[in-house]
Amino acid sequence: MDFQVLRDWHEKFSQELDTVMEFWLRHSHDEEYGGFFTCLGQDGKVYDDLKYVWLQGRQVWTYSRLYRKVPRFRRPELLQAAQAGGEFLLQHARVAPPSQKCAFVLTRDGRPVKIQRTIFSECFYVLGLDELGRATGETRYQKEALTMMEAIVRWVREDPTELGRPQLAGTIPHDSMAVPMMLLNLVDQLSEGDAEAAARFSELGSWSAQQILMHVQRNGTAVLENVSEDGKELPGCLGRQQNPGHALEAGWFLLRYAQCQHDPALLSQTVETFVKQPFYSGWDPEHGGLFAFQDVDRFCPTQLECKMKLWWPHTEAMIAFLMAFADTQDQELLELFDQVAKYSFGKFRDPDTGEWFGYLTQEGKVALTIKGGPFKGCFHVPRALYMCEEILESLIKKTETTGES
Amino acid sequence: MDFQVLRDWHEKFSQELDTVMEFWLRHSHDEEYGGFFTCLGQDGKVYDDLKYVWLQGRQVWTYSRLYRKVPRFRRPELLQAAQAGGEFLLQHARVAPPSQKCAFVLTRDGRPVKIQRTIFSECFYVLGLDELGRATGETRYQKEALTMMEAIVRWVREDPTELGRPQLAGTIPHDSMAVPMMLLNLVDQLSEGDAEAAARFSELGSWSAQQILMHVQRNGTAVLENVSEDGKELPGCLGRQQNPGHALEAGWFLLRYAQCQHDPALLSQTVETFVKQPFYSGWDPEHGGLFAFQDVDRFCPTQLECKMKLWWPHTEAMIAFLMAFADTQDQELLELFDQVAKYSFGKFRDPDTGEWFGYLTQEGKVALTIKGGPFKGCFHVPRALYMCEEILESLIKKTETTGES
């Protein structure tokens, strides 16, 4: 791969980020109640006005981060929309204050419709509000994010009672990789440029990374989504479940952690175990694209979408490969980035009305034409485009400086 | 369609019922704890030993019903397995007696793993135990079924508190068609040949039929899965959701009700609205097969499997068409039966190892090779084969008697 490949992709990612953000800026703002419509059809038309708290928090994050970090997005309309989204969360996400528990989905005007007995609505509330505080300079947002973070950590590490999950005799206590992944991502977010926060969350970061590493099983050859609390394999479908996109996302979370910790051993273990290996076992050799779910013993998974190609495993793979390449200069990783980016731009991207399709058949045909829905909003696509643009830019600069071409 | 078509299908359905039952008899019995393994791979191998209460109750029903009604299945091994399944349910399904609430899934030895905040585990508990009581002649099973039925009716019509669903300010109270459908099916089950039960459940049957008919919207042109409690359309995806297979299943439940009530107007309304119309709007004109979900305004549904072809809408369509044909002699219905039966036998049936695949792509390719899983067990396929065999037999006898050919 030569210099021109990096330049070509940099231009494509940069243009695509503009197009994608234009889609959300044009179609998703709720001017009346604040917050965002995320159930958007192919052309951006709102087909449902429910507000999913995950997606509200994520869109607040995306707008605030781009405003703060990318000069061409430092536009008042982004900050205003992010702030209106943040205020909507502050006013409506918590179902019954003083409890910190948030709803999963709200009506357009903010009344709770459903609550999940997990931590994820709360995590995206933290992610969005912390970044909004950084973008606006208003510390009240970050203060609220920290208070929520304390509740999340308490639920995960001390007492899950408030989540409301019944304790049943047949439920095997287990560690779902999503939980420490999410925590590690939040530690990264909260610690950026803040020595006090970094110190405060240092032990949590280390704990989260260790918990993620417990999911490496079978002599390092497999990442399993669920393991016992002491890091052993579990029986049945639950224990055998693999999610290549999730492993790759955990991969770049761990790469960032290893960078911060100056831990080359963790970095190289992560590249092998969470970046290359999930790709080689999760890529469909027949039609291309990453499978949504797999069974480590190659039984057929029970998830109906297991062979479908979803957008987010591919955005996370692009970030993971490019970040790992920047860390290692291993050409194989740049080739894998190129392969996934070509597949993604060719199959998921909608050149007609902007943004990406989220759900393809195994063969790569668009299965659902929606651009947003209960689980897809303004997050994975623009985050990957922004992060890859940033990494490509630094790679190009570095190459120019060292005179390579 | 001539007499020979009926005879050919009769032979095929009869042989297929034997093959399908052979699959479950060979692979699904848990000789140690009682009850059934339902997570079975293509060749019948158990890939998970969790026991889903819906599927335990349904398999008890299927075994008991065939034992009681079909002479060639009056075999001790069926009754013994059904009874072991019934005892497993009696011992383990209820999570915390004296509460009637049942688990959704149990460990192999009967410890609760998950509880759903709905009525369906309890409904299939009733269905299985009532039929087991009829097959064995042991009244204790039916007595337990009736006690559970009382709790279900109380939860649906008086007080849902025990189901544990939180009351949230943004949740629109609505009627999900699955609930009155299930109740109408249970009224049919409990009332068979029992004048006292028929009288006891007469008002419930009428209420359930009326609730189902509330789902007919837009001047009779659409059956919607969810409507308001006073029978109005709801906003958003929830309100626009259609499920062609569900409408067809409701169709044959209503046909049986109309037969019992000697109500020709309801019968002919049902044929048009719940049998023909869901087929014509739900059949894929390009690849054949019934879509899993649709949106009445033709927005793209958000369910990832919306365009996939699932086994059970097709089994329910076969029953609905054949039953409606027997009631009306309308040749169009026999042609539709023939069309769906050809598709189903061609695409879902596995000629190699028995039973049917459950999940095909839109194009009709096998997407999941499992024969059983968390939602597919020994129920829809054998129920349809048994019911169609019975209807075909009576049609053939009638034709022979009247001398038609």
Image (spheres, coloured by chain):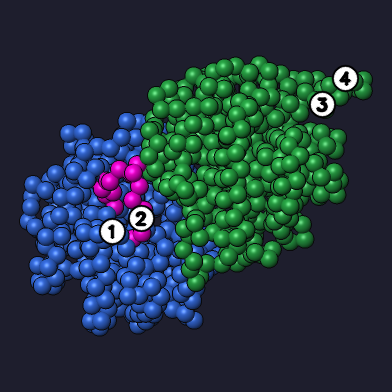
Chain colours: A blue, B green
Label 3 lies in what chain? Answer: B
Task: Please state the horizontal and vertical placement of residue A29, each as a whole percent of the image.
Answer: 45, 75
Region rendered in magenta: A163-178
Q: Earlier in the sequence, mark 4 or mark 3?
A: 3
Kindly indicate the quadrant of the structure image that contains residue A377: bottom left
Look at mark 4 in the image and give the residue it sits on: B400
Q: Nearer the viewer, residue A186 or A287?
A: A186
Going by the numbered disc 4, the residue's amino acid type is: Glu
- Quarter in which the N terminus of chain B is drawn: top right
- Compute the Cα span from label 4 to label 3: 9 Å
Q: Nearer the viewer, residue B272 or B184?
A: B184
Q: Mark 3: which secondary structure?
A: helix
Going by the numbered disc 1, the residue's amino acid type is: Pro
Q: Are marks 4 and 3 in contact (CB under 8 Å)?
A: no
- Quarter in which the C terminus of chain B is drawn: top right
Which residue appears at 33% of the width and 71% of the height? A99
Left or right: A13, with A400 as reference point: right
Label 2 lies in what chain? Answer: A
Look at mark 2 in the image and give the residue it sits on: A165
- Compute the Cα span from label 1 to label 4: 68 Å
Look at mark 1 in the image and give the residue it sits on: A160
Query: Is A175 within the magenta?
Result: yes
Q: Mark 1: which secondary structure?
A: loop
Label 4, residues with CA under 10 Å away: few <14, some 14-19, many ≥20 = few
Q: Nearer the viewer, residue B202 or A153?
A: B202
Which residue appears at 64% of the width and 61% of the height? B227
Going by the numbered disc 2, the residue's amino acid type is: Arg
